[in-house]
Image (spheres, rainbow, N blue to C red):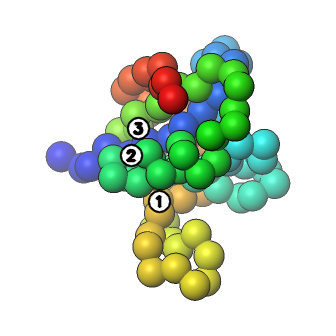
Amino acid sequence: MTDLLFHVADASEWEAARAVGRYERSTRGLSLAEVGFVHLSTADQWPAVLERFYSDHHGELVLLTVDPSRLSAPVRWEPPHEDSDELFPHLYGPLEVGAVTTAGPLSR
C-alpha cells in the first residue's frame, strides 16, 4: 500500500470543493493557479504545517487524508525552499474529492 498523504484545509474551502468535485487550494490563502501545485504532507509533517501556517487561523480546519493511488495528477517530492533537505509531496494538479479518504476536524 502507498503511504497516505495529508493536507490541512479550511473547512469551508473543503466543503466548496466537495460541491465541484475537486480541491484547488495550494495552501492557506493561495490557490493552485497561483502556486502551481497543492501542498501535501506526510503523517510526520502535517502537525508542523498546522502549527507553522495555521496557528492564528480562527475558522474551522479539517485534515484531509489522501490516497495517492487515487490521484490523476503527478506528485513530486520537493524541498519547501532551496536551503532545506526535507522533501514534501506536491500535487501538480487539482486534488480530486474521490482521492480523499477522510476529512476530519482539527482542533488546536
Q: What kind of element bears circle 1?
A: strand
**Residue 104 picture location, percent across and down:** 43, 21
Q: Disc 3 or 2, which lies upstream in sequence?
A: 2
**Residue 46 picture location, percent across and down:** 44, 47
Q: What whole-number distance in Å separates the C-alpha atoms at marks 3 and 2?
A: 5 Å
Q: What whole-number distance in Å separates the C-alpha atoms at marks 1 and 2?
A: 8 Å
The amino acid beneath tag 2 is Leu
**Residue 4 picture location, percent across and down:** 32, 44
Q: Disc 3 or 1, which lies upstream in sequence?
A: 3
Seen in the picture, residue 57 relative to 19 is either above or below; the reply is below
- Write down the residue under mark 1: 89
- Image marks 3 and 1: residues in contact by CB distance under 8 Å: no
- Write down the residue under mark 3: 66
Q: Disc 1 or 2, which lies upstream in sequence?
A: 2
Could you say which is closer to the camera, residue 98 or residue 48? Answer: 48
Q: What kind of element bears circle 3?
A: strand
- Write down the residue under mark 2: 5
Q: What whole-number distance in Å separates the C-alpha atoms at marks 3 and 1?
A: 11 Å
Could you say which is closer to the camera, residue 16 or residue 69? Answer: 16
Seen in the picture, residue 18 relative to 26 is either above or below; the reply is above
Residue plotted at (60% across, 33% down): 9
Residue plotted at (53% across, 43% down): 50
The amino acid beneath tag 3 is Val
